[in-house]
Image (cartoon, grey):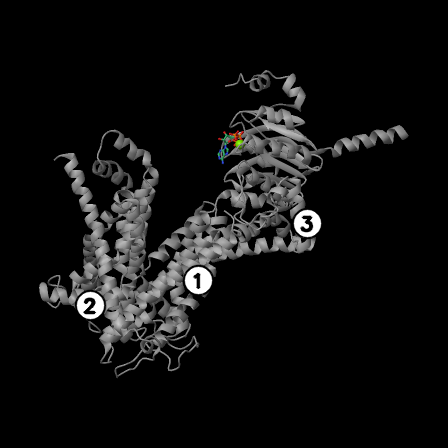
Amino acid sequence: MGRLVAERLTAAEEAIRIKMEVQGLSVHYGNTPALSNVNLAVKANHVTALIGPSGCGKTTFLRTLNRMNDLIEGVRVTGRVLLDGEDIYRPGTDVVALRKRVGMVFQRPNPFPMSIYDNVAFGPRIHGLRDRRRLNEIVEKALRDAALWDEVKDRLRSSALGLSGGQQQRLCIARLLAVEPEVVLMDEPTSALDPISMLKIEELIQDLKATYTIVIVTHNMQQAARVSDSTAFFLSGELVEYGPTDVIFTRPRDRRTEDYITGRFG
Amino acid sequence: MTRIRHSVLWYDRFFRYVFVASAALVSLIILAVVFFVARQGFLTFTVVSPWEFLFTTNWNPPANYGAFTFIFGSFAVTVLAICFGGPLGLAGAIFLAKVAPEWVRESLRPATDLFVGIPSVVYGWIGLTVFVPFVREHVNGAGFGLLVAGIILGIMILPTVISVSEDSLRAVSPALEEASYGLGATRWQTLSRVVLPAAAPGLVTAVILGMARAIGEAMAVQMVIGNSPQFPRSLVTPTATLTSEIVLEMGNTPFGSTWNNALFFMAFTLLVLSLAMILVVRLVVRHRGATP
Amino acid sequence: MNKYLADRLATACFWAAAAVITGILLFFLTHIFWRGAPVLSLAFVLGTPREMTAGGGVGPQLFNTFYILVLSLLFSLPIGVGAGIYLAEYARPGPLTNLIRLSTECLASVPSIVLGLFGAVVFVWYLGLGFCILAGAAALALLNLPVLVRVTEEALRAIPVSYREASLALGATKWQTIRRVVLPSALLGMVTGVSLVAGRALGESAILIYTAGLSVSRYFPDFDPFVAGETLAVHLWYVNAQSLVPDATRIADGSAALLVLVVLVFNLCIGIPSRILQRRLLGGGGK
Ligand SMILES: Nc1ncnc2c1ncn2[C@@H]1O[C@H](COP(=O)(O)OP(=O)(O)OP(=O)(O)O)[C@@H](O)[C@H]1O
Ligand SMILES: [Mg+2]
């Protein structure tokens, strides 16, 4: 009896640990397929890396996870994407609420043309927070979490466009953290940055993992190896292989994965 | 929290409808304009025969309604305006887009704004105080007439012609130009054989938009055309156009009278001509889309 | 012909064209202000007009010009900006969008005298407003509308998609995104556009003669929108065409200069504060 309960608990725990699950996902731009029949489970409090050659559909995949694809003309999505067991493509889904839970950091830093403070406060404000003291707290915490506080605390009211590229990207991360999402999607967040900024953001990702579920696209193999727990390898719109990062990088099952990782790929 | 959420979504939907409604209203307005002007205008033909209206020149309401003089006048001033303003405007646009050094271009930029800033009655007043006396003394006739109207309109359409053609000249890919220079062509050769052909649809659009502006201009023309319903014997005899006649007579005719309706039909003619020009512009632009 | 010679010749022609255009402009401006400046006294600018005797001013006309402008913007701004937002942010390619775009272009191409007649039929006659400021403002609003739609759409389209994506990815609704990110960023462009619209509206006359009328109220300033309200531009036409005052030339000279001055000053005045406003929106002294 007792053993049975214990077993159920671990099963339940196991179920909770799957944050997002993608089942039989295909995406078309008009009539051109971009993803076909992808199945993948994103674990909670994990960093999942998406790798693959240019044009293989990583960005497309990432953008299906919070329905940013809806903004593009003529995109067709089939299959299911579950967030905590609920299909986010079910008709009647509140897309806006979904995007609050599943936030996104883009390849190029895209701060709003406002002050640093207003950038970070943007999210809490649109979600109805008016209290000045609370806002100040949230902004400070988000900037600290994004490891930016010390660099900007004296110039919160100046324009965010005056920050360096790396600072801007961390500001975008802080802006996202301020809305307390559950999942953070990052599309090549360091590709426009210098090595030092890149390392800062990688450290940041390691810290954030405790609180958030992170999915990151990267072209940088070392980065994937350094920051991620699981890795998914995409090729021409198909998910070739998915597993723990150390396994993918040391003894991949698929020949094509090995070729890509070792750089023998076209 | 859910209440806030609710109102946020409500606002989102509400404003979507507001924007859709505004856009729909714009369509509705142009339909209403066409409808009301056409309806009032076509009442003319319960009394006057279309043939008389469109093809005879005896304008003597309420007995005779021959409006051909005005139609001819409108076309004549438009053609003259294009003859004066077209080449000058195109040359100015080429100068601004491709020839002028940076500092000249920057100091000329406000000039086009100034041209737009001068109201059309002021153009008319300048015509009246400068060009009419000048023509009267140095050419001949009364001074009033197609010539002065054409010159004034030619100047008035300059900003339209310049800005539209300058844009289309700038839109020509620099790679094309560089290719031509790379082959040893001079600037004029590059302009005339590469840039101008590539920008041609835009230049045509500029000229048509200038024509649309000229044919619809009322006040400036009315002030310098002479306002006589006579078929013009020369460029310097007083005559009238569709617009000048409407401005002149609208105030003297009771609403609903045949005379008044005839003025509305003139307005309808102008409307049709302007809309036709827009459609031509659309065709030209689409043509450009097909051959990049 | 030698190709270098042809090139020189063409270049000379283009410089000549530019010189002619600038020359015309300078000549016009000098003519306007040379003749008008002596007339521009406070008594003229703020004085009341006279029907038969010399010495009248254009105060009520100047007032009406701005009053009608403000009213017409009041009508056309919400609709024009709304339609512009629709085209830039919501419209998907399709027949409906095409129709709206075509309508805007068509409306923009309608000659103002034709819009004036439309205003006369609908506002003056069918709605029974008579010749009055309100009818004039409503007709003028129709003239502003398509330009407002276009400048709004252009200003919004100039805002990078990444701003919108960033906002949506934070869980903002479309309206919140437009209201808090897109519109503030596009404000400068829109203000510039509106100032162009306003400048044109200030000088517009054909549309107003048979809607706002040719006379002015006996009181000054008179905020009653249901009385006839001749504007400065219309007045300039009127004194040239049919006025009985002996000093019509003087009044015309002054009105022309005042009108051009008003338009220019207006455009200048709106340009500078909008730049300051923009800087404030972008956040303090950064960069
Ligand atoms: N908006 C779009 N319209 C049409 N096709 C698109 C669009 N966006 C992407 N595609 C196509 O879909 C495929 C996948 O694109 P995606 O951007 O997802 O690739 P990616 O893996 O992110 O590449 P990269 O590493 O270069 O960012 C590509 O073939 C691309 O050409
Ligand atoms: Mg990508």
Q: Residue A106's image quarter?
A: top right
Q: Is mark 2 within 8 Å of ligand 1?
A: no
Residue placed under numbered mark 1 in the picture: C76
Which residue occupies 27% across, 72% down? Answer: C254
Disc marking residue A137: 3
Q: Residue at x 41, y 74 (%)?
A: C129
**Residue C146 located left or right of residue B138:** right
Tell me the CA gap for discs 2 and 3.
70 Å
Q: Badge 1: how crowded within 10 Å, few (<14), some, or many (20+)?
A: many
| Marking on residue A207 | none
Residue B147, above or below C133: above
The residue pinned by badge 2 equals B128
Q: Nearer the viewer, residue A72 or C166?
A: C166
Identity, as a three-letter code, of the amino acid under mark 1: Ser
* Other residues around mark 3 within 10 Å, as few (<14) / some (14–19) / many (≥20): few
Estimate the x, y position of residue C271 in percent, counting from the top left: 41, 58
In the image, residue C63 lies at what x, y percent?
38, 73
Judged by depth in the image, the label closer to the viewer, 3 or 1, is 3
Callout 3 secondary element = helix
Q: Nearer the viewer, residue C84 or A36?
A: C84
Above or below, C175 against A167 in this view is: below
Name the kind of residue labelled 2 in the image: Leu
Q: Which element carries disc 1, helix, strand or loop?
A: helix
- Chain of the residue under label 2: B
Image coordinates for residue C42, horizontal then vertical, percent: 34, 76
Instruction: Estimate the spatial distance between the alpha carbons at disc 1 and disc 2, rounded to whole Å.
Output: 34 Å
SS assignment at label 2: helix
Residue A51: image quadrant is: top right
Q: Amino acid at mark 3?
A: Glu
